[in-house]
Amino acid sequence: MKKNSLLFIAVITVFASYSANAQSSSADNIDVKTEAGKVRGKLSKGIAIFKNIPYAAPPVGNLRFAAPVKPIPWDDIRDAIKSGPTPPNPTPKAGDIDDKPTVGNGWVKGDDFLTANVWTPDVNSNRLPVMVYIYGGAFVKGASDVPLFDGTNFAKKGVVMVSFNYRLGIEGFLKINGVPTNIGIRDQIAALKWVQDNIAAFGGDPGNVTIFGESAGAICVGILVTSPATKGLFKRAIIQSGSGQAVLSGEQADRIANQYAKTLRIKNTRDAYIKFTPEELLASQPKVTPKMVKLETEDFPDPSGGVSLYFPVIDGDIIPEMPIINARNGAGSDYDLMIGYNTDEMNFFLLPTGLLKKIKFNVVLNLAVKKVHPAPSALIAVYKKAYPKKNLGELLSAILTSYQAQVPSIRFANAHSLSGKTYMYEFAWPSSVANGTYGAYHGLELPFVFNNLDVVKGERGMLGPNEAPHELGDKMQDAWVQFAKTGNPGWDAYNTTERKTMLINKTWLLQNKPHAKVLAAWDGVREQ
């Protein structure tokens, strides 16, 4: 056979091998075959980007208020270049901080919103580590395809990055008779199953998947880590400002559902709720407020301290018990875990209310702290000694940060480290927004994790008007990627004896037993 013929056959063989997985339909487009059909994404600076890929069928008709099912296959190549619809969620309100890069501009209407987005550096690998992000938003707002959560910079560092939508609010988390519990969590599990079945076509290794989430998304990660329904769906997990302890008992969830039924003058049944349009349900959500429902019970506290109603519920199925109890019993020990919180979490929630400025007397602070601690005077004394420069309002924020984020995160780390590999961090870099009053507030780590600092800069941007350290974004994302690749973010593992915790700021410091005296003041206080 002639030399030229052999060369021609070799070229055809290589091309056929490449085409089996992906075909480039133009210089800027790239096609990938999923189980349900082919999708067409785009190439941008060496990264292949796919958006709005169905991981489940549209939740309409008989599938509304139902567990997710696999997407309906399609014959033609599906466009995966443009952004798609989002779950029904409210338009964000303006405040000191512009959070639209985080939660989007509100609801983008459309039925087919149970979709995933993928960023990959190489569709032909099938060996790249995979990172799957679960967004927060108090279980009532948020979407996966927003500027801050662009996965391009993760892909540039050699991982396949995935994000997805899930149902929120009444349709995702209200406990309704005749409706599967925790529909929003079931959506997440369906998305993770889609990753297992399809991610190799995008270059990812289904055997090396890391899930990570922030706030409500972090609560979801804590649930997924300890749920019997997720075996084999991922290998590692990162919990950012949420521990999985913030769940409702069945009784608490029933109280919320009953109040909604009373307020809306309907029965708490699927047949009653399905008569509402998504628009009507979204408008109905704020008609029931935390003040209208007494959630505190003898066995379960109010997960949010009276500021939110929507949480996953213990159902004996997806969530068999409070996740931290499951963790103490060894659930989730097969997964590597990284968990952390921000130094000034509660400033994000408390500063906009003006409450902190009103606390000018010790008696007022004492009354506020009494809601979260049985010995408020003793606790306040500990915090005054630990933080002598803080005024009374700032002390309240520090105490509630411990109650809502710091203590639950450390307790979950303690539980998981008894049988599983665990790493701990505290994010402390302070934003300059609103003259620096917010500090290292709730959610501030996200621009650094995604290394997308430019989309949140400016006077009302998350980082504030001062120049943010881009090198911190590089270093933080490197740690997250290293954890996804190897199971080690680059510092010593956590245990209950030394409690090694990486303090993340412009400089990084591995601490032993940080905040020991403050934490000791919470000993014996029940799980929150």
Image (spheres, rainbow, N blue to C red):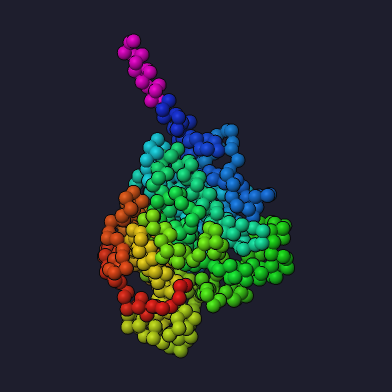
Question: Quadrant of the rendered structure where residue 527 is?
Answer: bottom left
- Residue 373 versus residue 400: which sits nearer the camera? 373
**Most frequent secondary structure within the magenta stretch:** helix
Q: Residue at x 47, y 72 (%)?
A: 528
Residue 103 vertical placement versus 299 (above, below): above
- Residue 315 versus residue 519: which sits nearer the camera? 315
Q: Residue at x 31, y 58 (%)?
A: 472
**In x, y percent, where is residue 262?**
70, 70
Question: Quadrant of the rendered structure where residue 265 is?
Answer: bottom right
Residue 245 vertical placement versus 277 (above, below): below
- Residue 91 versus residue 270: which sits nearer the camera? 270
Residue 38 vertical placement versus 134 (above, below): above
Question: Was residue 511 drawn as part of the magenta stretch in this picture?
Answer: no
Q: Residue at x 55, y 52 (%)?
A: 187
Residue 415 vertical placement versus 184 (above, below): below
Residue at the far front in the pictured view = 329
Question: Was residue 8 drawn as part of the magenta stretch in this picture?
Answer: yes
**In x, y percent, where is residue 198?**
48, 41
Image quarter in which the N terminus is found: top left
Q: Which residues are magenta?
A: 1-15
Q: Is residue 179 visible?
A: yes
Q: Is residue 168 visible?
A: no
